[in-house]
Each structure stands twice: as structure tokens, then as C-alpha cells.
Image: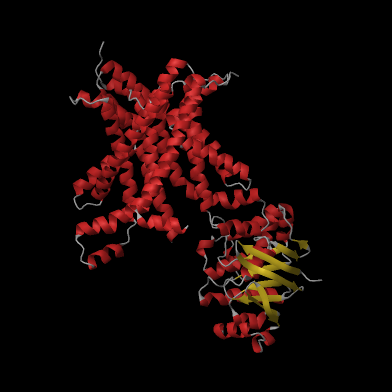
Amino acid sequence: MPSLVFSDVWAQFDTLLSGLLQTVWISAVAIVLGVVIGVLCAVARSARSRLLRVLAAGYVEGMRNTPFIVQLFLVFFGLPGLGIQITAIQAGLIALTLNLGAYSAEIIRAGIEATHRSQIEAGAALGLRRRDILLHVVLLPALERVWPALSSQFVLTMLASSILSQISVEELSSAGALIDSRTYRSMEVYIILAGFYLGLTMLFRLSFDLAGRFLFPRRRAVAVRR
Amino acid sequence: MIRSFGPAEFTFLVEAARWTVLLSLLAFIGGGVIGMVVALMRVSRNAMLRNIAAGWISVVQGTPVLIVLFLVFYGLPFLGLRFPPLVAAALGMTVYASAFLGDIWRGCIEAVPRQQWEAASSLALKPAQRMIYVVLPQAVRLAVPPTVGFMVQIVKNTSVASIIGFVELTRAGTLMNNVTFQPFWVFGSVALLYFAMCWPLSVMSQRLERRLHAGRRS
Amino acid sequence: MPVVVAEDVRKSFGSLTVLDGVSLSVSEGELIAVIGRSGSGKSTFLRCLNGLETPDSGQIIVAGHALAPGEEALRALRQDVGMVFQSYNLFPHLTVGKNIELAPRLVKKIGKAEAADIARSVLAEVGLAEKYDAFPEQLSGGQQQRVAIARSLAMRPKVMLFDEVTSALDPELTGEVLKVMEGLSRSGMTMLLVTHEMAFARKAASRVVYFHQGRIHEQGPPEEFFGAPKTPELQQFLGAVL
């Protein structure tokens, strides 16, 4: 069995690092935008307008039942075909955001559906406006409830961003492929990539846990009590 | 020469979709077998087995499917093993599926109430008998909806095998796009075919889930 | 020769001492009613007797088996000790008959036909012969608990432990379960039960044991125990529950 030689790959650490930063940056933007879409969509699915409900459901089901790579190709190759010029990064961001939007919509919707009727009635009894009830009584508690599930989905989005290498966005996996082509050390490259992604996964989990404590005071209180 | 995207081209995609189905089945079977072992190790009383399974789950779940496939694709020849792309892809997908199914099934096994384990122990059943005759039959019932749901993920993630050169539906789409230059039609059709495979599974999973909850409440 | 011997049994969960030196000896055919507040350690003690909990120290011998670490020793002990739980714990995926036959077949390697005979006879003993093919969820709570008793009986235990077996039942269903237990006791079974049913303890028990703060605080035959409690703690407890 041949032995592993990592030194050639480590020599290209700068390439890996810039890919890593690109992955973090793209993931962060997609996560923020994706959650916004997810919230809007989750609310739309319980809207009074039937058209709105059907549109939202169609988007969510469509995204959840097709592979991300095909969605990415549709955006990257398809939009220019319709006369819309976009860069690879833009295409990647659009696809990642739309993908996460659908998944987070479904997660947030489950959180909304778990809201007890009596909570809404209590809000109404206090004379809150419909909009305030939606935000303070339904939406924020729902987000708090599903935060762990959302966090897992965010990690999956970060991992899915590796597919962006297929339209030559220069993120972590592309950096790996580039180093592979320079050094012919495939095995070493992909072991290191796996390690980097594992590190990112842990880093993301930790950040979302901290962000959850910051965003939802009760989470903080409960965590401290433990 | 540029071809236009017509019925013949669509048929080509449908035929390629058969490879997606085959790869999904192989991944499900392989992932199911290893996933079962992972789940049982994860709930074992032996701390070392538990830790190995936990490590396997978090490493595979924390790595992109793409990288898992690359590791298997380059790893096998590295170990001196040569396989055709279908087998390499199936092995890679097996690794991926085993971690997720192992984790899902561990949850189902642990969801069987503690009292059931205790009742079986009190009847002097051996740990293996307790697992086979008391815990697993109840865990299987809980496991069916999420397992069907995960099959959707398997089908979708077989698309990543296109990157290591296995010609399934997505790869066929890429090839077709290169000769027709009609990406919207080509990848739209590809997406439609995936949807046709995945959506029924999604719906089935949701229905089973609802029925399970209804049954439990009564 | 006592059937159950416990000597200076101690058990803590973290910093919480649950059993603080419990000693008890039970003769063949006795029915011991164990009473006390929740958290007094009575259930934990019962669970120690068949190894569901492991004591930190002390000695336990049940039906001739010393409680010792190790899977084999534990299983030998459990073959002779029946346990009935508060929440019945029938196996929901098996019929009543299969619930009862499972352990005789797997543990004692008894043949299918013979196991079925045993199942039918223990079911008749608890008055549910016609429920052989029913699934647990088709039965009332009281019936499920009687099946659970039958399931234990099928192993022909030398001792039976009952852990608050009527606490989860509606009041009108406790009678049928208690009647089965009384019949069992009359047939000579050695029984320990943790219970809140004072009337039953008074009527059926040969001895009543009061647990307080992880110890046996007072014990005696029912007439004496209920009629003339000696310690202020027991007087106070009986004053609160009777």
C-alpha cells in the first residue's frame, strides 16, 4: 500500500485558506437570505389567500424533491438562456438560498403549527394587533422551538456549497480540486478537505448554538440552568 | 452539430434515470445493512462500540457527500482495489447512507420506552433476545416514515455521483446540455424526472408519519 | 430458610441517598406490603431485588440466587423472580398469548404447544382465558395488568414483585387486580408489593413495612401496624393517607 504524503498539499495552504473563507462567506450569506425566504414562505403557507398558499407549497415541494446540483445547473445554465447574465457566485448564492429557503420554510412551518391556540387567544385578549400576534406570539416562539432543526439545516447548506465547485466557484472543494491537479495527491487532498469540512461543521454548530442563546433569552436561561 | 431537445432526447434522460434508480437501491440496501450495524453499535453497552459508531456518524454527517464520494473513489484504488464507476458510486453512497440511517434508527430504538426494555429484562431475556423480540419490532414501526423520507435524500444525492463520472440522470443531463445548448429544457426535464421519483416517496413518508401519530394518540 | 434476604442495602443516585441501609428477610408464602411516601426508596428497593437497579453495597439473596454482577447470574435470578410494573409494560406488538409465551419459549426453551398450554392455564388463573388472541391495546387497564401478572406467572417464579401495580388504574378497575393478587397469595406465592392500597395491605398482607428516608422505619403484622403504630413518623403518615 502506498503511503500518504501530505507535505505537497500543505505547501498550498494559501489556496485552501482562500477557498475556506469563500465557503464561509457564501454559506453565511445564503443562510441569512434563506431564513428570510423561509419565514416568508412559512407565513405564506398559512395565509388566507389560496393562491399564495399553493405557490408557497409548490416552491417548497419542488425544491425539496429535486437535487441541489440540478437546481444549481438550472440557475447557472438556464438563466443566461433566458437572457439573464449572472456570475458563477451569483448563481451559486441564488441556488443555495432558494434551496435553504424551502427547507427552512418547512421547518419553521412545523414550529408555527405547534403553537397552541390558547397562546393566540391570549394575545388577542390582550388587544394585540394581528401583525403583533403573528410576530411575537407565533413567529418568534416558533423560531425558538425549531432553532436546533434549523441549525442542522444550516450545516447541510454549508456542506452543499461544495457542489458550487461544479460551476467553478472558487470555494473549498474547488481549491482542493485545484491542488489535486497540481500535486496528483488526490487521497491526501480529500482527506484534508474532509477534515476542513468537519472543522467547519463544528464551528457552525457552535456559532448557531451561541447565536440561539443570544437571539432567544429563554434558551440562554435554560442552558445556564443545565 | 447542435441537436434540439425533443422526445428522443427526453427518452435518453428517462433511460439514464434507470441508473439513478439502481444506484439509489444499491445505496439503500448497502446503507441499510451497515446503518443497522451502526445503530446497534450506537446503543450497545460497550463504550468502545458506541464511540466508534458515534464517530462514524458525526464524521460522515459533517462531510459533504461530494467529499465522501471522492474519498471512496480515490481511496479504493489507493488501497489497490479497482471497481467500475457504478460500484464505486454505490460504495460511496453506502457510506453516506449508513451514517444517516444509523442515526435515524438509533433514535427509533431509543424511542422505545425504557419500561419495555425493563419488562424484557425482568423476564430473563438475553440482551440479544430483548433487542430482536421486544425492542426492534417496536422500533421498526417508528422507523418506517423517516426511512422512507430519507430515501428521497438518497435519490437526490445520487446526483452527486455524476461528478465522479457515473452516468446517471444528472450526468446524462450534462451530456445532453453539451449537445443541445438548451439548458432550461434539459435541466428542467431532469428536475421533473427527479421530482417524479422523489415526490411520491415524500408524500408516502408524510402519510405514514401522520398515521403513526394518529395510532399513538388513540 | 427465607426466600428473600436483603442485608444493609445502600444505593445513591449522585448525592441523593435513596437506600440508607435496608435489611429485610421474607419467608416462603409471606405477602409483604411496602408502604411509604414517594421518594422514600421503596420502589428502588423492589427494583434492586431483581437487579433492575444495582445497589452500591449490601447483600441480596432472592430464591437462592445472590444478586451479583454479570449477565448470567442476573438472568438466573430473574427466572425465579416475577416482576409486575405500574404501567403494565405488555409488549404492544404481540398478542396476549404471545406476550405470555415469549419468555418460556426463549428462556426456558419450552416447545410451542407446551408454551401455549402454559399461557392458557395462567390466563385462566387471572380470569382472562378468552383474551388469548387479543392485543394489549384492546384490553382495559385492569385486564392488561392481569395479563402482565399472568406473563410473570408463566415463568413459574418463586417470588413475585409488584411495583405500584394499581396506581395507574381507574379506581373501579383496581378491585379485579387486587383479587387476582389475593388469590395468588392464598395459593402460597411469596409476594412483595409496593402499594398505596392501605385497605388491601391491611386485609391481605402478612407483614407491612414502612419505608422512611431510605430505611425501614417500622414493620409488623397489619393489625399491630395499623392499629398501634409506634413511631410518630408512621402515625403521621397513616394519619395523612387513611
Q: Is residue B72 left or right of residue A36?
A: right
Question: Which picture quadrant has residue C108?
Answer: bottom right
Marks counted in the figure total: 0
Residue C228 versus residue B205 in the image, above or below? below
Furthest toward the bottom, the residue is: C228
Q: Position of residue B62 (x, y in %)?
A: 46, 36
Residue that appears at 49% across and 40% down: B101
Q: Is residue A77 above or below residue B133?
A: above
Tell me, yes or no, if residue C48 can be seen here. Answer: yes
Point 67% across, 78% down: residue: C217
A128 or C91, nearer to the observer: A128
When the figure is inspected, residue B204 is found, relative to residue C51, above or below; the finding is above
The residue closer to the viewer here, C66 or B139, is C66
Q: Position of residue C32 (x, y in %)?
A: 69, 75
Residue occupying the point 63% across, 45% down = B46
Q: In terms of image quadrants, where is residue B162?
A: top left
